[in-house]
Amino acid sequence: MAAVQVEGLSRHYGEREALDGVSLSLLQGQTLVVFGPNGAGKTTLLRVLATLLRPHAGEVRVLGARLPGEAWAVRGRIGLLGHEPLLYRELTARENLRFHARLHDVAAGRVEELLARVRLEHRADEPLRSLSRGMVQRVAVARAVLHDPELLLLDEPRSNLDPAAVELVDPLIGSASGRTRVICSHDPGGGLAEADVVLGLRDGRPALLRAAGELRAEEIVELYR
């Protein structure tokens, strides 16, 4: 069964087409990696799949729900990790996660489990504004998986993370998590290594859509030229 099914998706901002005629299919448990230069439409695609933006044309189904009409049925099954961490800087890491836990009716024990897994127990009661960008990103990862989502939407999820932190979060958001994932990336080699399907965007239009095994990193680099 397709976890994500998109046919002829278009989304514009005024007269500018952010997405134009995008189609793709992603099976449950697979990973789609989306490449393209800045402004190509990668983040817009994630926000449409996350139910945060309405498509202006085309059909979008996520986890069996048709968007936007059935968005209410699927929001709690999606985890989003975007450029913005969706956290309150004046609250502590623990307070932020507890707030999101209440939104999703998640037990408080899950908050403590995730603080331990991203190794922030010792800084969990400090305001987020006092933490490094890498630490904030680790809290954002914990927030994205707090409710055990079926689908992860990840916008350059390893940004601001040093190698040790990447090792901490990869069991939560990497291929070992077993979740269906859509990842926006600028890393041709690394992104290709964890992809099942690759979508390349340029100026909002699909420039390539292929199985990862059929691609070389050099072909992805061409999108940026």
Image: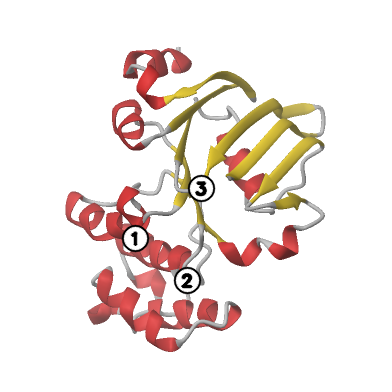
> The residue under label 1 is which amino acid type?
Leu
Q: Residue at x 43, y 87 (%)?
A: 108
Q: Residue at x 25, y 52 (%)?
A: 166
Task: State the SS at label 3.
Answer: loop
- Mark closer to the chain start, 1 or 3: 3
Crowding around mark 2 (Cα neighbors within 10 Å: few <14, some 14 to 19, many 20+) is: some
Instruction: Residue 203: tell me if it is visible.
Output: no
Instruction: Residue 166: tell me if it is visible.
Output: yes
- Mark closer to the chain start, 3 or 2: 3
Q: Specify how the rendered protein is coloured.
A: secondary structure
On screen, residue 64 above or below 218: below
> The residue under label 2 is which amino acid type?
Arg
Indicate left or right for 172 with 152 as reference. Answer: left
Indicate left or right for 79 with 213 as reference. Answer: right
Q: CA distance from mark 1 to mark 3?
A: 17 Å
Numbered disc in front, either 1 or 3? 3
Residue 206: x %, y % from top left: 60, 21
Residue 2: x %, y % from top left: 59, 43
Q: Which residue is mark 1?
A: 172
Position of the N terminus by quadrant: top right
Position of the C terminus by quadrant: top left
Crowding around mark 3 (Cα neighbors within 10 Å: few <14, some 14 to 19, many 20+) is: some
- Mark closer to the chain start, 2 or 1: 2
Q: Residue at x 51, y 80 (%)?
A: 101
Task: State the SS at label 2.
Answer: loop
Task: State the SS at label 1.
Answer: helix
Q: Identify the mark at residue 28; answer none if there is no mark.
A: 3
Numbered disc in front, either 2 or 1? 1
Query: Residue furthest toward the bottom?
Result: 108
Q: Which residue is mark 2?
A: 89
Residue 33: x %, y % from top left: 45, 35
Numbered disc in front, either 3 or 2? 3
